[in-house]
Image (tube, helix red, strand yellow):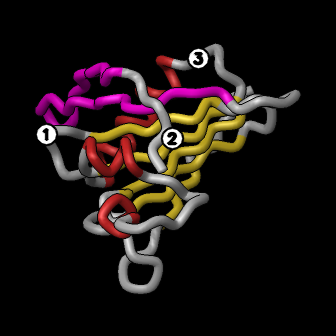
Amino acid sequence: MQVASIPPFLYPTLVDGKVVKIAETFHRHTKGPDPILVLHICLPEDEPTKANLLEVSKVLRLKYNKETRIEANIFSSEEGAKGFSELYLFEGYEKYYSTWRAKYWLDRKTGKEWLDYCEGPHDKENNPFVRIDLSTNNK
């Protein structure tokens, strides 16, 4: 199942003196009293690492500074970012799932902010996500 996506926008950012491009491939708000901005992000020219994933988190926090809640799934490929779904299993979903490298969460109401990431293909048993608590006073 593929959800309609927006054309990617590139946000160049600097990590270790090198430009890292961030492409946004999916952008929508959930419904309800506390909507969440849901994003799918890919790094089209770089394999996601802890350093550049932390930089992506910083860019999202600043770019969407008026959003109360942000959930961003970050991928190593544009194809993975466009085809991924946490909720639905469908034929061929594994190829998208294997490109999932991180999940970023920010809730400015509670001050909670974290990054779950892995370097290399995500696998719940062999290469699970590691959580970095980024919480500060984000209210």
Residue 128 among magenta residues: no
Q: Label 2 is placed on what type of residue? A: Ala
Residue at the image position 47 percent from the left and 28 percent from the top: 60
Magenta span: predominant SS is strand
Badge 3 marks a residue whose secondary structure is loop
Is 52 located above or below residue 85 in the figure? above
Q: Label 3 is placed on what type of residue? A: Asn
Is 127 located above or below residue 132 in the figure? below
Q: Label 1 is placed on what type of residue? A: Glu
Residue stretch rendered in magenta on the structure: 7-29
Check if mark 1's residue and mark 2's residue have beta carbons within 8 Å: no
Near-viewer residue (31 or 75):
31
Q: Residues within 10 Å of mark 2 (few under 14, many from 20)?
A: many
Badge 2 marks a residue whose secondary structure is strand
The picture places residue 89, in percent across and down from the top left corner, at 52, 66
Residue at the image position 35 percent from the left and 59 percent from the top: 96
Distance of mark 2 from mark 3, alpha carbons?
14 Å
Residue at the image position 46 percent from the left and 68 percent from the top: 129
Residue 19 among magenta residues: yes
The residue tagged 3 is 65
The residue tagged 2 is 72
The picture places residue 77, in percent across and down from the top left corner, at 24, 48
Distance of mark 1 from mark 2, alpha carbons?
18 Å
Residue 113 shown left or right of residue 131 in the figure = right
For the view shown, which residue lies furthest in the top direction? 66
Which disc, if any, is residue 45? Answer: 1
Q: Residues within 10 Å of mark 3 (few under 14, many from 20)?
A: few
Residue 51 shown left or right of residue 66 in the figure = left
Is 64 located above or below residue 122 in the figure? above
Distance of mark 1 from mark 3, alpha carbons?
26 Å
